[in-house]
Amino acid sequence: MNIKKTYGYILIITLLLLWEIGARYSSYAYLPAFSTALKTLIEGLQTLSFLNQIFISLFHAFCGLFIATLIMVPLGILMGRNDFIFNLLFPLVEFFRPMPSAAIIPIAILFLGIGYEMKLFVITFGSTWSILLNTITGVRSIEPVYLKTAKVFQFNLKKRLFNVIIPAALPSIFTGMRISLAISLILTITVEMIVGGNGIGYYILDSERSFHFPEMYAGLLALGILGVIINKLFQLTEKKVIHWHYGQN
Amino acid sequence: MKTTLLSLINVSKSFNTQVVINNLSIDILKNEFISILGQSGVGKSTLLNLVFGFIKPDKGVISFHNHEINKVLIFQEYNKSLFPWFTVYENMKLVATSQEEIDKIDFYLELVNLISHKEKYPWQLSGGMQQRVAIARSLLVQPDLLLMDEPFGSIDHQLKSELEDELKDLRLKFNLTIMFVTHDIESAIYLSDRIIILKNGIENFEEFRIDKSLFSDKNSIKQSTLYKSLKSKLKV
């Protein structure tokens, strides 16, 4: 491993040590030691209910991301290739995009209640913009030579779309998905905290309200670790799918 | 007597107010290798784009004499004309329109000495190799007319010389008709049957027929009167 890369890990270990020492020598009841939080997390991971909360949150986040990808990639391709559709829809995108996704929650509750549909709607709404904008950018910045080559060899629309446009835009689409992945996780936790019910966000807030501080920190630790694992898995998938992009760069 | 493959008749093309090609009339014969020379901005690439059909002339006609012509254009950007997400073989297969053409992929890759690289990605190949694949890919679809826009423009001298020899052989082997845009007078003389110098103004082009028997040896080209004359006309 590169020595410079170890600096980050050393910092994390230092912070955890500071947490451990600080908690042991402080009288704050709401700051258990790191070792206590870690022990609670390990114990929690052996119970079905805790694993279930994690699974529910992941399911919400991935469903939102999946639906956003399913809708926004085709729409982004259409907007990237067709000026009329771009000019028609872009002002609308610009109106919704800067809107904090949490601001949509009250309206979503009004129309969809506080169930699964509402959570999914909010997560999907927040995850869409990065995917959409990055798909548009990816499609609009395709090397003109690729498109000219497709024309030279008289590719039909399907061949042009699946063999030229989508592969060429994939690196940008992946960038959008990576950003949206983080947003979908953040929104999942936010929604779960606001409307409750289930999920790791609800678990953290519920633990705080019932003074189960080690559980609250265990939930936070679980979130941090999950974020790292999911990000790594996404990077590995990305490197596998668009290996040519990394290869030529 | 050779037949005419295509004719440009009084073709003009402007971009904004800038006249790039003015009232140009040229016949391109079947199996002819014609090089287009000229200073920057005289419309060499525009001419290829017009013939290919990427752009339409403002005036005049480009006639293929009522024949369906299969045209292929090879771009200057050799490192971008192949799709980097496909292997060499997949790049070839993508343009094939029949099983017969797919079956011939190995044959054409062998022809350009790249059969052992067919599973590689374009970015794993050198610039010269990529341009060879682009040529092999073009041959796969058996073009009636091969348009080449400075295909060896940014390739080093030694490799360029090898590619020119390969192109010369392929041209004879497959009776290709080639329109070849270049800045390189030496290449133009070595490869062509006819050279056209595009010019701005009323006298819009000048043509030179090449006596192939005089220029079979590449080394003699630079000493020739034709070379010196073209050089002075192009002010290079």
Image (tube, coloured by chain):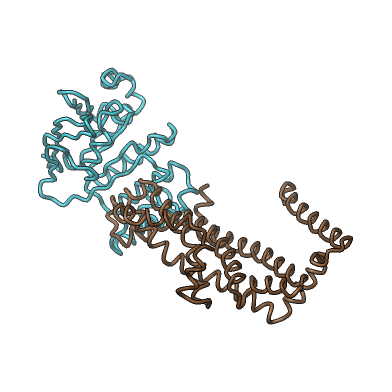
Chain colours: A brown, B cyan
Residue B55 or A109: which is nearer the viewer? Answer: A109
- Residue B17 position within the rendered picture, expressed as x and y whole percent measured from the top left: 21, 30
Residue B77 or A160: which is nearer the viewer? Answer: A160
Location of the N terminus of chain B (image quadrant)? top left
Query: Position of A183 compared to B168: left or right?
Result: right
Query: Position of A174 compared to B74: left or right?
Result: right
Location of the C terminus of chain B (image quadrant)? top left
The correct choice, above or below, for A106 with respect to B38 in the image is below
Residue B93 or A210: which is nearer the viewer? Answer: A210
Q: Quadrant of residue A62?
A: bottom right
View extreme (right): residue: A25
Q: Quadrant of residue A25?
A: bottom right
The correct choice, above or below, for B71 with respect to A237 in the image is above
Residue B116 or A109: which is nearer the viewer? Answer: A109
View extreme (bottom): residue: A48
- Residue A98 position within the rendered picture, expressed as x and y whole percent measured from the top left: 48, 54
Q: Quadrant of residue A133?
A: bottom left
Residue in view at x 44 percent, y 52 percent: B84
Query: Position of B189 compared to A96: left or right?
Result: left
- Residue A125 position within the rendered picture, expressed as x and y whole percent measured from the top left: 47, 65
The correct choice, above or below, for B169 with respect to B106 in the image is above
Residue in view at x 53 percent, y 47 percent: A249
- Residue A221 position within the rendered picture, expressed as x and y whole percent measured from the top left: 72, 66
Q: How many marks?
A: 0
Residue in view at x 25 percent, y 41 percent: B49
